[in-house]
Image (cartoon, rainbow, N blue to C red):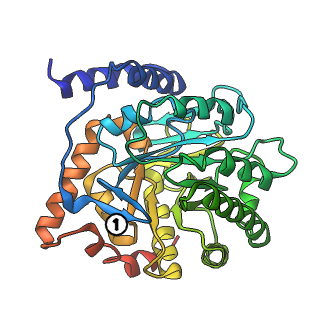
Amino acid sequence: MTLPLLENVALKGLQCLDAETAHRLTVLALKSGLMPGRRTSADSRLAVKLWDLTFPNPVGMAAGFDKNGEVPDALLKLGFGYTEVGSVTPRPQSGNPRPRVFRLPADRGVINRYGFNNEGEAALRRRLDARPTLNGIVGINIGANKDARDRVADYVSGIFAFADMASYFTVNVSSPNTPGLRDLQGRAALAELLTGVISARDECTAKFGRHVPVLLKIAPDVTDGDLRDVVEEVLAKNVDGLIVSNSTLGREGLSGSGPAGEAGGLSGTPLFRKSTIVLARARKLAGPDLPLIGVGGIDSAQTAWTKITAGADLLQLYTALVFRGPGLIEEILSGLSARLEEHGLSSLREARDANTEAWAAEAL
């Protein structure tokens, strides 16, 4: 059997299982080597240089898949340009009770309410220390424990725990499944958080000699005023980039079939429009220089291209793989190369922002 056919059979088998079990089996398959690496496009035009990093291509695995840093190298071998582990909290936590993740096949979406389930900083550190090499770009997404008395201190703990090895950090204040976490997107709370995190990063820069980029991941469920406040604080505190966006609490556009009424964050195809509008508005507010990562509903080369033309420097996906499998990575990369060829462009940066104004003007 050819690799695509084997993957299709495996994908259909996984979809017969409950979503969380299927996720765990996929991680174990990657960990064991049962899921082989793939050859993907080596088009130098798809490379993206940001900070002191060169991403071989713009497509990354979003946080949430490899929470405990079990398979970063296996994911890179699948063709991702980079991957992001976590979210990790200082102490282990089990998250919310099962079932807590639900597929919406008719809508190509997923609802989850995991609640930052992870094995904690110490376990993640042991796994990352055991990597055979530090090749490849591996970001670390940091969060706060549900019962934290001082959430800023939890994020600062993540910086100190991984500053010597993280390619970049993502400060996740946008999960809808930890009570009160999104309150950290409010201007006063965000200013305090970013001050603490950037101060810790700068202390680590002096110690280790590398300025590790810090990005902020935000929710799509923000008002224009809140988004303006977020971007102004990001610029004022010299945060290195924004990730737009996490899952949504909204249920717009769902067919109503399946477990659409379950509580939690909605990701996948139904999130594409809202997240792309917020991305474009963030680009307009931030200007051309702040790096933005576009996330939400990317399930094809066309949606990936749309995110870039709306203002994204890099991309992340996760949910689409539940329905499409790893062959989607090569499909997206080949499609992006074809679009560069079609438009006579030599880099993705030349395509970025081409449709920012149009997407920013769309009604939410």
- Crowd tier of the residue under label 1, counting other residues whose Cα lies within 10 Å: few below 14, some 14–19, many 20 or above: many
Q: Is residue 59 visible?
A: yes
Q: Amino acid at mark 1?
A: Ile
Q: How many marks?
A: 1
Residue bearing mark 1: 308
User: Which residue occupies the foreground of this view, 152 or 280?
Assistant: 152
- Nearest the viewer among 145 and 273 is 145
Please state the horizontal and vertical placement of residue 336, each as a whole percent of the image.
Answer: 22, 58
- Asked whether 124 or 211 is in front, the reply is 211
The part of the image, by quadrant, that contains residue 98 is: top right
Q: Secondary structure at mark 1?
A: helix
Position of 151 with respect to 20 (left or right) is right
Q: Position of residue 95 (x, y in %)?
A: 70, 33
User: Seen in the image, is 206 located left or right of residue 82?
Assistant: right
Residue 61 to residue 10: above or below: below
Residue at image location 52% in from the left, 54% down from the top: 168
